[in-house]
Image: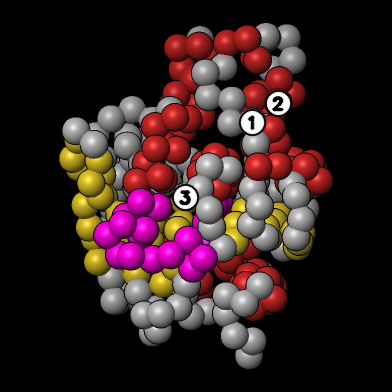
Amino acid sequence: MLISQETRLVFEHGRPLGALRPAPPFEQVELPRFGDTGQLAWIMRGADPNAPWLLYLHGNSATVASRGNVVRYQGLRSLGLNLAAPEYRGFGGVAGQPSENSVTDDARHGYRYLRETLGIPASKIIIFGWSLGSAVAVNLAADVPSAAVVLEGAPASLVAIGEMRYPWIPIRMIMRNPFESVLKIGRINAPMLFLHSPEDKIIPIEEGRKLFEAARGPKQFVEVRGGHIDPADVDASVYFGAVRSFLAAHGLLTRR
């Protein structure tokens, strides 16, 4: 059952895009893919066109239009950032089935759009991942240069979480999408910010701390309230304040 249902259990994909949109300026673009078409991304420009760009990678059981993502877009853009949010295949009406390799490729298409289409240098690109998107962010940031990486509710290893939940099953032998961020994060040279809630019941904070310990410096770990889903709502001042302070400390935003 686990083998046949792994894609559904890991990604919880298939939801339509939905009608929710961020405040303008907002643009939906199609990302070029080799030999393929149809991947979409949202482009949300801030007040300063020369400000850094944040590449936003969402988690499972969501789309780029899910409320939790839109709340984060609005708060992050209010810091003075420009945002790009690529959608994954199998999500939000984009054709295809997701896998660890495919969603990482989809994130790479978003990064390539910033670099090649918009002409943004790597020194002005921040890679941001929430939940499963943090594992996608680690996969991407381990292979491409960036100015900084922000991970929220990040698992150190999905296969390890699977082993904890199903200790009587040889999960490591059968899981096709292990997302072992803890084995890859040491390849990231950019400064890293970790946001995690002690109340998180989906990805325990111990997972985030394990990933933090494996990361190379400079790095920072900030606890936020609100569990896995709601820190950007219930602890907005700490959440967005931590992002601002971190980016300002590394010359990507001005302090206020």
Q: Nearer the viewer, residue 13 or 88?
A: 88
- Closer to the N terminus: mark 1 or mark 3? 3
As drawn, the label of residue 160 is: 2
Q: Earlier in the sequence, mark 3 or mark 2?
A: 3
* First to last magenta residue range: 110-130
- 172 or 37, which is in the foreground? 37
Q: Which residue is mark 3?
A: 58
- Tell me the crowding category of disc 1: few under 14, some 14 to 19, or many 20 or more residues within 10 angstroms, Cα based: some
Residue 65 is drawn in which quadrant?
A: bottom left
Q: Position of residue 246 (x, y in %)?
A: 68, 71
Dots 2, 1 in contact, CB < 8 A: yes
Residue 119, image x and y in percent?
33, 65
Q: How far is disc 1 from disc 3 in space, using C-alphas? A: 17 Å
| Residue that appears at 18% across and 40% down | 37
Three-letter code, disc 3: His
In the image, what residue type sits under mark 2?
Answer: Ala
User: Which residue type does callout 1 highlight?
Assistant: Glu
Eye-nearest disc, 1 or 3: 1
